[in-house]
Amino acid sequence: MPASPELGTTHTLVAGPELLRSVFRRHAAGVAVITAERGGRPAGFTATSLTSVAAEPPIVSFGIGTGSSSWPVLAEAVHVGVHILAEEQRELAATFARSGTDRFAPPTRWTTGPEGVPLLEGVLGWLVCRVVARVPAGDHRVVLAEAVAGDAGDTAEAGRPLLYHQGRFNALRD
């Protein structure tokens, strides 16, 4: 049996929300905005949980809290928009992370895309996805969605992604 790693006196072994948050602050994640609409009203939120699940068929996943102001729309949405943000879009990420504001008001630039999904302008790439499952996971739901349309942008000038690390939006360093 391998030896246990040395633990300092400031470490905790009790699993819970604070430990999870503390560990994941050390995990750099890409930043995306997820959008949907219901009754002509757009909704959206910033997500760092976006994952490519399968290539065939093309499926992605993301998590959303059931207490989120966007959850009522996402709970019934047939299609969602997935937007990959560029490093210069920190304010857009912050807007969609903030509750109690109209996230789609200026200066947010968006249009209605395929399947009626709100599409943000100026992102590195976007997908419109059909929701195939909503899996309960504690106080969240893991949404699985199959890509049905999208735009990867200009691959010659793909830009650099926005990252989330240590509780802040960051850019890649050279």
Image (spheres, grey):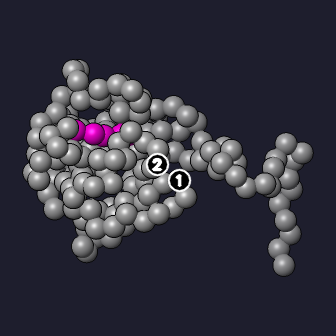
* Rendered location of residue 5, percent (x, y): 83, 60
- Residue at left offset 43%, top offset 42%: 68
Q: How many marks?
A: 2
Do tag 2 and tag 1 residues touch (Cβ < 8 Å)? yes
Decide if residue 41 is on the left or right side of residue 171. left
- In the image shown, does 131 or 8 lie closer to the viewer? 131
Tell me the residue that label 1 is attached to: 139
Residue 30 figure quarter: top left
Q: Secondary structure at mark 2?
A: strand
**Is there any visible trace of residue 97 in the rendered image?**
yes
**Is there any visible trace of residue 52 in the rendered image?**
no
Above or below for 58 versus 78: below
* Rendered location of residue 159, percent (x, y): 27, 38
- Residue furthest out toward the right: 9
Please tell me whether residue 43 belongs to the stretch shown in magenta: yes
Decide if residue 64 is on the left or right side of residue 85. right
Q: Amino acid at mark 2?
A: Gly
Q: Amino acid at mark 1?
A: Asp
Instruction: Tell me the magenta residue range.
Output: 42-46
Mark identifier at residue 65: 2
- In the image shown, does 99 or 3 lie closer to the viewer? 99
- Residue at left offset 35%, top offset 42%: 70
- Residue at left offset 34%, top offset 25%: 101
User: Quarter of the image containing the C terminus?
Assistant: top left
**How far apart are the two marked residues, 2 and 1, measured between alpha carbons?**
6 Å
- Residue furthest out toward the bottom: 1
Above or below for 29 versus 145: above
| Most frequent secondary structure within the magenta stretch | strand
- In the image shown, does 148 or 55 lie closer to the viewer? 148
